[in-house]
Image (cartoon, grey):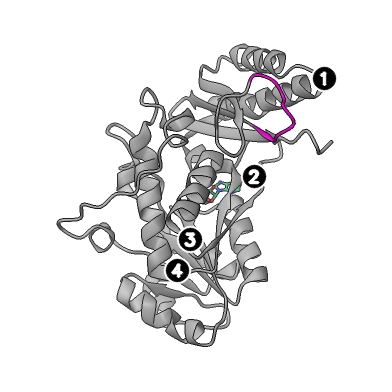
Amino acid sequence: MSLELVNSSHGQAGVKLVCAKDELRSALAGARGAERSIGLVPTMGFLHDGHLSLLRTAREECDVVVMSLFVNPTQFGPGEDFERYPRDEERDLELAASAGADVVYMPSVEEMYPAGFSTQVEVGGLAEVLCGDPARRGPGHFRGVATVVAKLFNAVGPDVAYFGQKDAQQVAVIRRMVRDLDFPVRIEALPIVREADGLAMSSRNAYLGPEDRERAVALSRALRRVEQGARAGSLSEGIEAGRRELAAAGVESEYLEARDADDLTAVDELNGRPVLVAVAARVGKARLIDNVVIDPKAT
Ligand code: AMP
């Protein structure tokens, strides 16, 4: 399917491709006027089953499904992988159509950030730990994420926006932004979709050569160790067991930490509230993240 074909087709198996926000607004005006519900799935493309599960859920729950496809330069730090981030727009459009998207919004960088762009959304506190720690990706990463998501919410006006629990900190940051800035949108976080061996799906898995692909499974194994330890009575011992699991695979983590799932404050032991255990590690050319939420009320 060529981009032109997708561009000119709509309905049935088609998906409408729009690249300008005015065009997007017109494309959605009818639905909005008729009070049909709009679901938004923000993505950076190179779609896999994780993205498709968000799209399929949006399709089941909403009248109109919009997917945004934008590799957002402002959430990449200097020296990160913006330039080489994997891209395949034609395949993405086909997959988005097959998962039920009605509209794909694919703005250019200039459309998203016109000359003179100078406004940022900064979510304090919980954007400054884990990946937002200045020694890691830094708070600039979530400033970029929050700003682009705020712009997407304004451009699309969704009733519901779908995010993956894979990026747990991103979900926490977006929820806080929505609450603090009164965005009239419901945030839905959907479970992590994994490969058969446990590796969390990610567009960045494309960077893994065969040996690194095997080592990468250590992240999900480490998280299982932490959960086992916590459920056996000691979260901190679970964390130690998780660190040993990573070390045994020769994976040096950036962090393996337990945090309150809601406000991301540090947690030493289970305290009756859901705990997020998050890991980030560089494996070969890929920086990978994964997490598990331990809800003491669930078995
Ligand atoms: P990305 O294209 O990586 O920015 O991801 C777009 C959306 O898909 C985000 O909300 C991600 O959290 C979500 N996502 C990415 N990987 C997965 C996965 N393995 N399972 C569930 N959701 C995912």
Counting from the top left corner in percent of width and height, residue 51 is at 56, 54
Q: Residues within 10 Å of mark 2 (few under 14, many from 20)?
A: many
Q: Residue furthest left?
A: 116
Residue contact between numbered discs 4 and 3, judged by CB atoms under 8 Å: yes
Q: Amino acid at mark 3?
A: Asp
Residue contact between numbered discs 2 and 1, judged by CB atoms under 8 Å: no
* Quadrant location, the C terminus: top right
Query: What are the residue bounds of the magenta stretch?
Result: 268-275
Task: Determine which of the numbered discs, if any, sits on residue 192 in the image.
Answer: 2
Q: Earlier in the sequence, mark 1 or mark 3?
A: 3
Q: CA distance from mark 1 to mark 3?
A: 43 Å
Task: Determine which of the numbered discs, if any, sits on residue 92 in the image.
Answer: 3
Residue 24 shown left or right of residue 225 in the figure:
left
Task: Determine which of the numbered discs, if any, sits on residue 248 in the image.
Answer: none
Q: Is residue 54 above or below residue 124?
A: below
Q: Residues within 10 Å of mark 1 (few under 14, many from 20)?
A: few
Q: CA distance from mark 3 to mark 2?
A: 20 Å
Asked whether the viewer can see residue 81, the reply is no
Q: Amino acid at mark 1?
A: Ala
Q: Residues within 10 Å of mark 3 (few under 14, many from 20)?
A: some
Task: Determine which of the numbered discs, if any, sits on residue 232 in the image.
Answer: 1
Camera-side residue: 127 or 284?
A: 127
Q: Amino acid at mark 4?
A: Val
Mark 2 sits near ligand 1, with its Cβ under 8 Å away: yes
Counting from the top left corner in percent of width and height, residue 17 is at 41, 73
Mark 2 or 1: in front is 1
Q: Is residue 5 above or below residue 243?
A: below
Asked whether the viewer can see residue 101, the reply is yes
Tell me the residue that label 4 is attached to: 104
